[in-house]
């Protein structure tokens, strides 16, 4: 499963949850500077670091009873509806999930204002799960804009 959070304020975060045998892991990619600001702000193309993005990547084992796992494993995950706005300044969330038989790919903007309880529950649980992966490494990745 991958949940990408693009808030209108702050930095973006991507949560990847995967299994290895009976163990469940979460990988959290935290962008240390806002991608949205980076994309929408003109840059000096002569700067050699203009395509480098600082990220913090952490991984941790989580319990199979973690609230986000229970949310994902409920059959309701396949009922997530997409309701994405075109406004760049909105809060945007993207989900991809597969159980190797079925998959869901969905996106929503401003789920709290839209009163979409299913998305809000999933997003709230993702914040709790994110805290389980300690901040460890800061790396610069090449990112073409």
Image (cartoon, grey):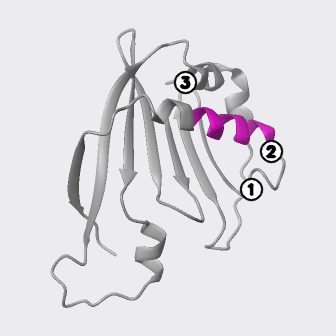
Residue lying farthest to the top in this orientation = 22
State the image coordinates of residue 3 (x, y, percent, origin top left): 52, 43
CB-based contact (under 8 Å), mark 3 and mark 1: no
Residue lying farthest to the left in this orientation = 48
Residue 35 vertical position relative to residue 62 in the rendered view, above or below: below
CB-based contact (under 8 Å), mark 2 and mark 1: yes
Residue 66 vertical position relative to residue 120 in the rendered view, above or below: above
Dot 2, how many residues are within 10 Å of its Cα: few (below 14), some (14-19), or many (20+)?
some
For the stretch drawn in magenta, what is the main secondary structure?
Answer: helix
Label 3 vs label 2: CA separation?
Answer: 26 Å
Rendered image: mark on residue 83: 1
78 relative position to 126: left or right: right
Q: Which residues are magenta?
A: 117-126
Rendered image: mark on residue 50: none
Dot 1, how many residues are within 10 Å of its Cα: few (below 14), some (14-19), or many (20+)?
some
Identified at 45% across, 46% down, the residue is: 14
Instruction: Write down the quadrant of residue 87 in the picture.
Output: bottom right
- Check disc 3 and report the residue beneath it: 101
Identified at 74% across, 45% down, the residue is: 81
Label 3 vs label 1: CA separation?
Answer: 24 Å
Identified at 47% across, 81% down, the residue is: 40
């Amino acid at each position: 499963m991958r949940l990408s959070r693009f808030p209108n304020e702050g930095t973006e975060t991507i949560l990847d949850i995967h299994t290895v045998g009976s163990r469940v892991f979460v990988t959290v990619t935290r962008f240390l500077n806002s991608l949205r600001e980076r994309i929408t702000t003109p840059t000096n193309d002569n700067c050699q670091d203009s395509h480098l993005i600082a990220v913090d990547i952490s991984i941790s084992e989580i319990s199979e009873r973690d609230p986000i796992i229970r949310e994902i494993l409920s059959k309701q995950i396949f009922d997530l509806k997409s309701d994405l706005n075109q406004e760049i300044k909105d809060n945007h969330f993207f989900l991809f999930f597969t159980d190797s038989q079925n998959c869901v790919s969905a996106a929503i903007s401003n789920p709290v204002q839209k009163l979409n309880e299913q998305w809000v529950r999933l997003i709230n649980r993702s914040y709790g799960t994110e805290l389980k992966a300690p901040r460890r490494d800061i790396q610069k990745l090449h990112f073409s804009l």
